[in-house]
Image (tube, grey):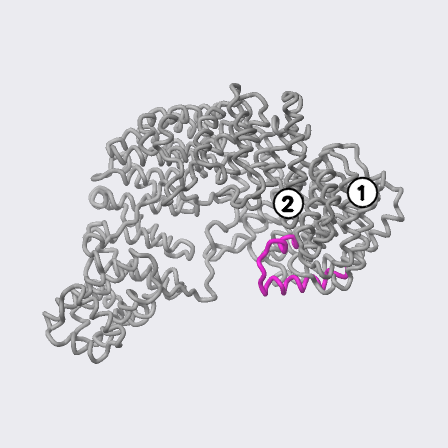
Amino acid sequence: MELSDANLQTLTEYLKKTLDPDPAIRRPAEKFLESVEGSQNYPLLLLTLLEKSQENVIKVCASVTFKNYIKRNWRIVEDEPNKICESDRIAIKANIVPLMLSSPEQIQKQLSDAISIIGREDFPQKWPDLLTEMVNRFQSGDFHVINGVLRTAHSLFKRYRHEFKSNELWTEIKLVLDAFALPLTNLFKATIELCSTHANDASALKVLFSSLILIAKLFYSLNFQDLPEFFEDNMETWMTNFHSLLTLDNKLLQTDDEEEAGLLELLKSQICDNAALYAQKYDEEFQPYLPRFVTAIWNLLVTTGQEVKYDLLVSNAIQFLASVCERPHYKHLFEDQNTLTSICEKVIVPNMEFRAADEEAFEDNSEEYIRRDLEGSDIDTRRRAACDLVRGLCKFFEGPVTGIFSGYVNSMLQEYAKNPSVNWKHKDAAIYLVTSLASKAQTQKHGITQANELVNLTEFFVNHIQPDLKSATVNEFPVLKADGIKYIMIFRNQVPKEQLLVSIPLLINHLQAESIVVHTYAAHALERLFTMRGTNNATLITAAEMAPFVEVLLTNLFKALTLPGSSENEYIMKAIMRSFSLLQESIIPYIPSVITQLTQKLLAVSKNPSKPHFNHYMFESICLSIRITCKSNPEAVGSFEEALFLVFTEILQNDVQEFIPYVFQVMSLLLEMHKNEIPSSYMALFPHLLQPVLWERTGNIPPLVRLLQAYLERGASTIASAAADKIPGLLGVFQKLIASKANDHQGFYLLNSIIEHMPPESVDQYRKQIFILLFQRLQNSKTTKFIKSFLVFINLYCVRYGALALQEIFDSIQPKMFGMVLEKIIIPEIQKVSGQVEKKICAVGITKILTECPPMMDTEYTKLWIPLLQALIGLFELPEDDTIPDEEHFIDIEDTPGYQTAFSQLAFAGRKEHDPVGQMVNNPRIHLAQSLHKLSTACPGRVLSMLSTSLNAEALQYLQGYLQAASVSLL
């Protein structure tokens, strides 16, 4: 695409159409942009548009499209074509910083993100002048430009907060500090001075405080990995100014908005974070400043109101206290009983209250409420911070703190008892207090794993939790019901099993509650209880104990999916999956109705898949229904195909990318249920599965390979007779996969199935070409993963066609090649093979080469006989060699950038491990002994003399053990 006015005009029109609400106009425009984004100059056209277009909406649209383009295409992935040509990359890096700095804020943010995406890949090696270009702009005095630089620096450096330590990371941080720390400190001081100069100018203060927030965030990122020498030397400057900003109150910066945090609150919360970082990680150096920060933050907490806009500030301030009180040498600050009482009374209890804003979220924004409360994304809520502070204080003062709170809990419960309908919030706070007091250590998988001995959890459960859940109306006091259900969930390991069994019908009953939070918690609690393990790793709650509730459980779970707001509720669908898994054959009578409901749901959500977890559990539930039913009645597979194929066809025809990998997995499961032939409905689909477009998407590869393997296992002879013209297509897929480092193992899975199942004559003409392709790949890029797969393949080939056929095919490609493969690949590398079945295939294959290949006994290959036997005994007896050369690092398929649907393996669609040599050989060591015995009978004396002169003593000892076990001897 040329940089021409005509192209700019075309691009403008298509960008406009992508904003159209009508999908008939919007989708073709999106497809067009997708089709041209590989062209040279496309990104430069976008940048030109966002600089020169007269329409603001086009500028913004171009900036978002550009950022997403960079996100999808900038990273260069091994084995894949470079999606942006080098001249475009150079031009983008040369122009993007000045363009970002001169753009309005809305566009500046998009370009700043794009710079940080490019920076993540190219900085510092491929973009060395980025830092100097940014630092030079600090001198401009224009805070619009300065804030642009700070914003970009923040998005570039914030990854230092969660990167693992490495030399590369340290080198980069050192480079950044050398160039950035001093200018940042000078900018910080200058900005503070300007704040006092412009103390009465509201608009100037807004800009300056935006800068201070970004500076404080950069301070956090640059100090996160370790305390840099520069910041240690300048701690006085930073900490004194941070402290004075914490205590600053300027009327001009206060906002009337009760929800949205203002600049002052955001700055103070970041400073609390910075102080907590220093208190936790650099306490020795921070010691002189700590007391004044504790005082300032304490005063902040006692004087800040309950409005939502202060939530982040209050929670960060409480987190600071929590991190301080856990450190042994700050213990003295909290020892006094009055201090503890004061913290409990003024900080913890007020911040545990259920406020009007929480109630509003509970009722109107339940998804967000659940995400915060259940999934622990409530890091910045007051309740969570207060809970962490209780835990921190209990580390050294468990007795006194428990004593203080017990009094609070009792008085709250008494208040509630006086007038439950008015005072229910008192009970809510009491339950929350008990929970935070009792829980010392917690995991998502197991709930509470360590509890405070001083709190009687079962007694509290029976007296205060159960009565709420037993009440006749499920819709009364929804917050308390949710609290009660959450209590069961959290303390499921502490409450005795008989109490859990009493709770199950109560939880099933609450699946009918109107409140989204209540029925979601009920589903989640059931799902967690069903995963608990008892003795012998069996589930704690058995299918027999659940027998009386099966019908009502399934009815209520599916009914819950029809409640307003829960049509795609992932917790309910996960509970359905877990119930199937626990109940097994007891669900069979309900399958016809269940599968109808699941396929209707599948059809509905396939129109617009938006909840990945929900979709995953839905497919898992479908797989479980199939497995459980077909286990006792294999014929039932037909009725599942009838129910599902219509929907599957629609999904494939409409190219619903998110669902296609799942559909292939379910189809593999169904096809594997057929015992003899492949039904014609599957054969009709077979040619479509070989279309190159399906194999372009990484997410499709594992399930498609598995599906093709199922075709080969169940119907190789049908393919050979009725679809022989498709064999080249099948091998074409293998050729594509084998060329990629990320997917070569999938290519081998397919090849192994072809070798194992296809009639030999149907692949005769292709065999030599297959080996040539493999050798080309070995020459071009030999990786450990490829070698392991290659070894398994050649040994499987040997097992299937015989050792002589293997030697002949190698030597037909190039004379003496068989010897080279033995010497350079099999003997030195066989120790790397992993997996029981894989090792067994290799052992049987090598045994055949040793004992069923005449050239090994009477040609120049004979010198390799003993080393090969030694390598085989090593495979049996030595530990696996799992070393991988330094230069090899595999990109995880999941890490490839862009919007590819990643592949998600369905646990309940998993293949049974298949052993191609299982029927032939049970114990490979005994098989070796028997085969050697047979060989020595054919040529007496030869084998023994080779063994006694050349085999190392330890290996010989092992071999004698195998011969004894097999009750044979060598002649």
Instruction: Mark 2 or mark 1: name the one nearer the start of the chain.
Output: 1
Residue under the point 24% across and 58% down: 797
What kind of residue is marked 2? Gly
Element at badge 2? helix
Residue found farthest to the bottom? 949
Residue in front for this viewpoint, 490 or 535: 535
Residue 13 lies in quadrant = top right
Q: Taking 472 as reference, is 234 above or below it?
A: below
The crowding category of the residue bearing disc 2, from other C-alpha atoms within 10 Å (few below 14, some 14 to 19, many at least 20), is few
Question: Mark 1 highlights which residue?
Answer: 206
Q: Which quadrant would the C terminus be assigned to in this image?
A: bottom left
Using the numbered discs, state the Cα–Cα distance from disc 2 to disc 1 in whole angstroms. 47 Å
What kind of residue is marked 1? Lys
Closest to the camera, between mark 2 and mark 1, is 2
The percent position of residue 379, horizontal first and vertical second, equals 63, 42
> In the displayed structure, does residue 803 sit left or right of residue 124?
left
The percent position of residue 851, horizontal first and vertical second, equals 17, 67
Q: Which residues are magenta?
A: 156-183
Q: Which mark, by number, is residue 399?
A: 2
The percent position of residue 183, horizontal first and vertical second, equals 77, 59
Is 718 in the magenta? no
Residue in front for this viewpoint, 435 or 797: 435
Q: How many marks?
A: 2
The percent position of residue 940, horizontal first and vertical second, equals 10, 74
Residue under the point 76% across and 56% down: 137
Residue 861 lies in quadrant = bottom left
**Residue 49 shows up from this direction:** no
